[in-house]
Image (tube, rainbow, N blue to C red):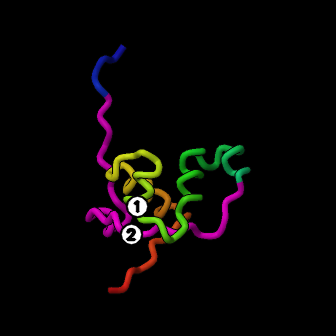
Amino acid sequence: MDKRKHKEKPHVFFNKELEMGGTDLKPKAKGSIPQLAVLLGLLSPFYYDLYKKCDGNTTINQLAEQMNIQIEEMRVYIDKLLKNGLITLPIIKA
């Protein structure tokens, strides 16, 4: 049995704002995904719950707090949803 520790590769960000540490961004779900997608194994229950929380009003930092997840991890999860076209990151105008 191989006793070497499994090393995870660092996440390569799809979105530059997330890569730069954007935690005040407010992800918004595109359309709607039925619960059936989870039952069919197309989306994990975790990602489905996260997707449902992306309402365009809640920041990534707030999502991390709500779900008791480290902010660095939450940025990766949001990036994966964004890369798969399930959410958008509305442009914030100053």
Label 2 sits on what residue type?
Leu
Return the x and y of residue 59 as percentages of the image width and height.
42, 65
Residue labelled with disc 2: 25
Residue labelled with disc 1: 60
Return the x and y of residue 22 as percentages of the image width and height.
31, 66
Which quadrant of the view contains residue 1? top left
Image point (49%, 59%), residue name:
81
Which residue is the extreme one toward the top? 1
* Side of 44 where 69 appears, left or right: left
Residues at discs 1 and 2 in contact (Cβ within 8 Å): yes
Q: Front-most of 46 and 8? A: 46
Q: Is residue 17 magenta?
A: yes
* Side of 27 where 9 appears, left or right: left
Image point (52%, 66%), residue name:
87
Which quadrant of the view contains residue 93? bottom left
Return the x and y of residue 2 as percentages of the image width and height.
33, 17
Return the x and y of residue 9 as percentages of the image width and height.
31, 43
Which quadrant of the view contains residue 92? bottom left
For the residue labelled by badge 2, is the local secondary structure a helix, a strand or a loop?
Answer: loop
Q: Does the magenta stretch include residue 43?
A: no
